[in-house]
Amino acid sequence: MESDNNMSLDNSSHENDFAVKDKKAKKRGILFILSGPSGVGKGTLRKAIMDLGGINFSVSCTTRPPREGEIDGVDYRFLSPEEFNKRLSESLFLEHALVHDNMYGTLRKDVENVLESGEDMVLEIDVQGAFQVKSKMDCISVFILPPSVKALEYRLCKRGSDNDVKLRLKNAEYEMSHSEEFDYRIVNDSLNQAIAELKNIIINCRNMSRGL
Ligand code: 5GP
């Protein structure tokens, strides 16, 4: 009798274990990918969604030199090609790509740590990186489109050299030709509307993952 009771106690404690594990599993955060051509306003949109709370930005590694005002460890981790290749050879990147003649990559540990903590993560990466992540992990991908190529050119001209603008416009064509492979697409014409659309996507995904 005593052992029966123990059995049932044991069983219920196992059930509790499973319930706790299940609850923990459900609490894993959501991974969002924000992609789109350079100059489309991904950075502004990403900053604007931070006030939702519970969402973190992955600070990428890059071999590109810092622009004026950019801070190492905040905007990017600025690495020499040697430092970047060392991390690459140690398989530290979840994804990496050569974009506009520079290397960019997302550290796997950063993403895992945040998702395991139950918070959401947003990656602001190019389409090559987006497809690498999509093939490896559950994620929600969002592509940001400019209202027109002219508008994109105007935005790029404000911050880059002529050669850099040409290269980024050429790559924009390639990136936009893949926009339909993303879960959601937002046209960044009115910034406030684009922010609202992106926030709605995040809120809806959170509600769905909680079964609401
Ligand atoms: P920028 O040099 O203008 O900051 O970024 C150039 C492009 O690289 C942008 O499209 C940006 O989204 C992308 N990018 C930034 N970080 C990463 C990254 O970690 N991985 C990949 N694949 N692309 C990135």
Image (cartoon, rainbow, N blue to C red):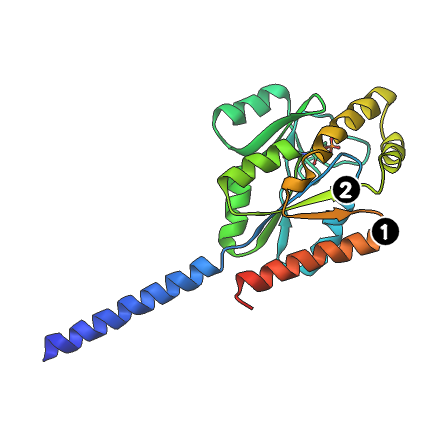
Question: Label 1 belongs to which residue?
Answer: 190
Element type at mark 2: strand
**Image quarter of the C terminus:** bottom right
x%, y% of residue 1? 9, 80
Residue type indicated by callout 2: Leu
Q: Could you tell me which residue is drawn at 49 percent across and 23 percent down?
A: 89
**Tag 1–tag 2 contact (CB < 8 Å):** no
Q: Residue furthest left?
A: 1
- What residue did someone put label 2 on? 145
* 143 versus 201 height, above or below: above
Is 123 on the left-hand or right-hand side of 190?
left
Q: Distance between the residues labelled 1 and 2?
A: 12 Å
Mark 1 secondary-structure assignment: loop
The amino acid sitting under disc 1 is Ser
**The quarter of the displayed image where residue 147 is located:** top right
Q: Nearer the viewer, residue 106 or 86?
A: 106
Q: Position of residue 92 (x, y in %)?
A: 50, 32
Q: Residues within 10 Å of mark 1 (few under 14, many from 20)?
A: few
Residue at the location (56% across, 22% down)? Answer: 85
Quick check: which quadrant has ligand 1? Answer: top right
Residue 11: x percent and y percent? Answer: 23, 70
Q: How crowded is mark 2: few (under 14 residues within 10 Å), some or many (20 or more)?
A: many
- Quick check: 25 above or below 113? below
Q: Classify residue 52 by image quadrant.
A: bottom right
Cβ of mark 2 under 8 A from ligand 1: no
Q: Where is residue 135 in the image (x, y as percent from the top left)?
A: 51, 38
Note whether 7 is above or below 187 in the view shown: below
